[in-house]
Every structure is written in structure tokens, then in C-alpha cells.
Image (cartoon, helix red, strand yellow):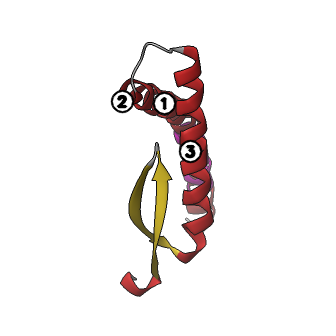
Amino acid sequence: MEEDLQSTKVNVCGRSYPVRVGNDKVELIQTIAREINQKVRAFQSTYKDRDMQDCMAMALLTYAMDLNEVTPATSESDSEVEQKLKALERVLDSALT
């Protein structure tokens, strides 16, 4: 698995960070870095009295909120699928007995 990782550098807020990701994720990590930079610039233009660290923190909070909104929906879908599978299992069990 280690050999499947590729080293790439991403630039976030003027700093370069080395990141090791799967070959299929290189473009994704670059896209995410561009989105982060855009969010930080948007916060900088809206809140001119805030420093870079404040704007990065606000961008991070925005992403965390977005992730939190998506995660419960996924869990509900998984739970629904699990319930349907259990119901199917009960039907199969009763048919076999």
C-alpha cells in the first residue's frame, strides 16, 4: 500500500505542504487546496481586520460544518440499508425453516 502513495506538494495560504496521497487522489488534493485558498481569500475580503490565521480558522470551520451536514445523511442511508438487509434476512430465514 505504501508504494501506491504519491508525494505531491500543495500550496495553502502561501505555504507549501508535502502530502502523500494515492495516485488517484493527487488532482483531488490540489482541487481542495485551491478551494481552501479561495475560501480564505473570501474571508479576507469580507473581514479586512482579521489576520490570515483567523481567515484559515473560519475556512476550516466552514468545511467542518459542511462535512457534519453530509455525514449524518450518509449514516441514515446506511441505517436504512441495514434495516432492509435484516428484513430480507428474516424472510430468508423463515423460508428456509
Q: Amino acid at mark 3?
A: Gln
In the image, residue 13 sits, relative to residue 9, either above or below, namely above
- Few, some or many C-alpha atoms within 10 Å of disc 2 (few <14, some 14-19, many ≥20)? few
Q: Nearer the viewer, residue 63 or 75?
A: 63
Q: Nearer the viewer, residue 24 or 27?
A: 27
Report, in whole angstroms, how far the alpha carbon at label 1 lies from the one at label 2.
Answer: 10 Å
Q: Nearer the viewer, mark 1 or mark 3?
A: 1
The x, y position of residue 31, in whole percent, is 62, 53
Residue tagged by mark 3?
Answer: 83
User: Earlier along the polypeptide chain: callout 1 or callout 2?
Assistant: 2
Q: Nearer the viewer, residue 70 or 26?
A: 26
Task: Left or right? Give the position of 63 relative to 77.
Answer: left
The x, y position of residue 55, in whole percent, is 44, 26
Stretch of the chain drawn in magenta: 75-89
Q: Residue at left 39%, top 58%?
A: 17
Q: Point out which mark residue 59 bears.
A: 1
The x, y position of residue 30, in whole percent, is 58, 58
Q: Residue at left 46%, top 65%?
A: 9
Q: Nearer the viewer, mark 2 or mark 3?
A: 2
Q: Point out which mark residue 53 bears.
A: 2
Report, in whole angstroms, how far the alpha carbon at label 1 lies from the one at label 3.
Answer: 37 Å
In the image, residue 93 sits, relative to residue 71, either above or below, namely below
Q: For the N terminus, give its image quadrant.
A: bottom left
Q: Nearer the viewer, residue 9 or 85?
A: 9
Disc 2 is placed on an element classified as: helix
Disc 3 is placed on an element classified as: helix
Residue 66, quarter of picture:
top right
Q: Point out which mark residue 78 bears.
A: none
Secondary structure predominantly adopted by residues drawn in magenta = helix
